[in-house]
Amino acid sequence: EQDAQRLLTAYREMHRSGGHIRDLGFTLIRKDGTRRIVEGSANLLRKDGAFAGFQGALRDVTERKKAEEAVRESEVKYRQVVENAQEAIIVFVEDAIVYANPMSERITGYTVEELKGKTIHDLSLIEDNEAAARELNRKLKGDSGTYPSEYRYVKKTGEIGPGAVCWLAVV
């Protein structure tokens, strides 16, 4: 009902303005009762300057829309897992932190915003900097192996904490 009204409104506007419709999405009910999501485009046809009809095309986008919804649902589930993990999950792009989950904040004492932009050198103990940076660089260069390691890190308070790190490249 709502789609029919939107479609009718779009066609009336196209007729009034002499324009066209591009990629108007709506649900189509087929003869057998199944529903398909389509996008339609149409042009106004004229003959001798007078309205002669419409010419258009429909594209079935049902599978694409289903796939997009599945990706959205997957992203929500992934985010819930990461946000509620009992481990610090920190994402580096190049050598700077671009994401840290809430547990990172509790473990390091830095807020998530304070962690953003920091490097491995900012967080690891000076004696561990070289080894930690070497492992991070291997991952950033596409190494797909996992290498559990232990590095000491410096909390915001200056305390030194032991950290078990499992480097993983996410591409």
Image (cartoon, rainbow, N blue to C red):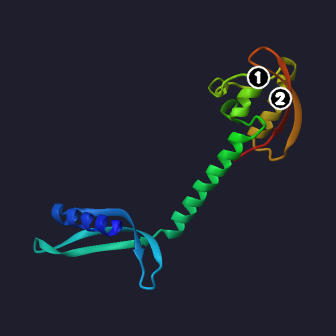
Residue at x-position 36% and y-position 63%: 24
Q: Is residue 139 left or right of residue 110?
A: right
Residue at x-position 20% and y-position 76%: 53
- Where is mark 1, residue-wise? 123
Kindly report which numbered mark, 2 or 1, lies closer to the viewer in this rendering.
1
The x and y percentages for residue 14 are: 22, 64
Point out which mark residue 132 bears: 2
Kindly check if marks 2 and 1 are in contact, taking CB atoms under 8 A apart as contact. no
Examine the image and state in which quarter residue 143 appears.
top right
Residue 50 vs 83, above or below: the answer is below
The x and y percentages for residue 27 are: 41, 70
Residue at x-position 16% and y-position 63%: 16
Name the secondary structure under disc 2.
Answer: helix
Examine the image and state in which quarter residue 1 appears.
bottom left
Residue at x-position 41% and y-position 77%: 29
Residue 137 vs 145, above or below: the answer is above
The x and y percentages for residue 117 are: 64, 26
Q: Is residue 34 left or right of residue 164?
A: left
First of labels 2, 1 by sequence position: 1
Q: Amino acid at mark 2?
A: Ala
